[in-house]
Image: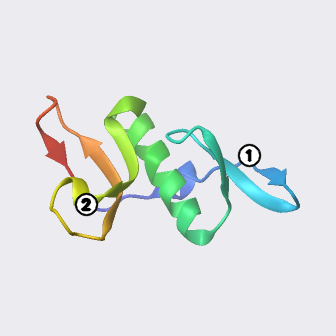
Amino acid sequence: MDINISKYHPTETFSRNGVDCFVCKIRNRLIKKTPEELVRQAFIEYLIVEKNIPLDRIEIEFPLTRVKKGDKKRADILVYGGNDNEKVV
């Protein structure tokens, strides 16, 4: 699957204590501008605009301990499926 997310990169930045930040639509707060966060925010925007995923169906940095006991990893972006029991990672 080929996705061009560059058109979804956040264009509005803010400065907090001299550090450039984005507003994360999912976390509803300022997040430090990093290359990783640029990709994450662009992909979130892609999901919202192109795939019509509602904000309340997306989680960021989801701890996998909620899926498998003892797993210390996390999913960068988790999208819940059509019903409450279905999850798509």
Residue 89 against residue 34 in the figure, above or below: above
Query: Which callout, 1 or 2, points at the residue further toward the start of the chain?
Result: 1
Task: Please determine whether, in this image, residue 35 is positioned above or below residue 21.
Answer: below
- Number of the front mark, 1 or 2: 2
Q: Nearer the viewer, residue 27 or 82?
A: 27
- Residue at horizontal 30 percent and vertical 50 percent from the top: 78
Q: Which residue is the site of mark 2? A: 64
Quarter placement of the N terminus: bottom left
Instruction: Residue 53: give x, y in percent of width and height.
Output: 34, 34
Question: Looking at numbered disc 1 in the image, what kind of residue is underneath it?
Answer: Glu
Q: Residue furthest right?
A: 18
Horizontally, residue 50 falls left or right of residue 86, namely: right
Residue 80 visible at all: yes
Residue 89 x/y as whole percent: 22, 54
Residue 54 seen in this snapshot: no
Residue 80 point in image, percent of width and height: 24, 39
Residue 77, quarter of the rendered image: bottom left
Query: Of the numbered discs in the image, which one, if any, rests on residue 32?
Result: none
* Residue 38, position as x, y percentages in the image: 58, 61
| Kind of residue sitting beneath label 2 | Leu
Q: Identify the residue at image location x=81%, y=62%.
A: 19
User: How would you rate the neighbour count of disc 2 (Cα within 10 Å): few for under 14, some for 14-19, many for 20 or more?
Assistant: some
C-alpha separation, residue under disc 1 versus residue under disc 2: 31 Å
Q: Could you classify mark 1 by the number of other residues whose Cα lies within 10 Å: few (under 14), some (14-19), or many (20 or more)?
A: few
In what element is the residue under mark 1? loop
Q: Which residue: 42% across, 32% down?
A: 55
Which residue, given by chain and number where applicable, does mark 1 sit on?
12
Question: What kind of element bears circle 2?
Answer: helix
User: Depth check: 22 or 10 in front?
Assistant: 22
Q: Is residue 61 left or right of residue 22?
A: left
The reply to whether the C-beta atoms of the residues labelled 1 and 2 are less than 8 Å apart is no
Scheme by which the image is coloured: rainbow
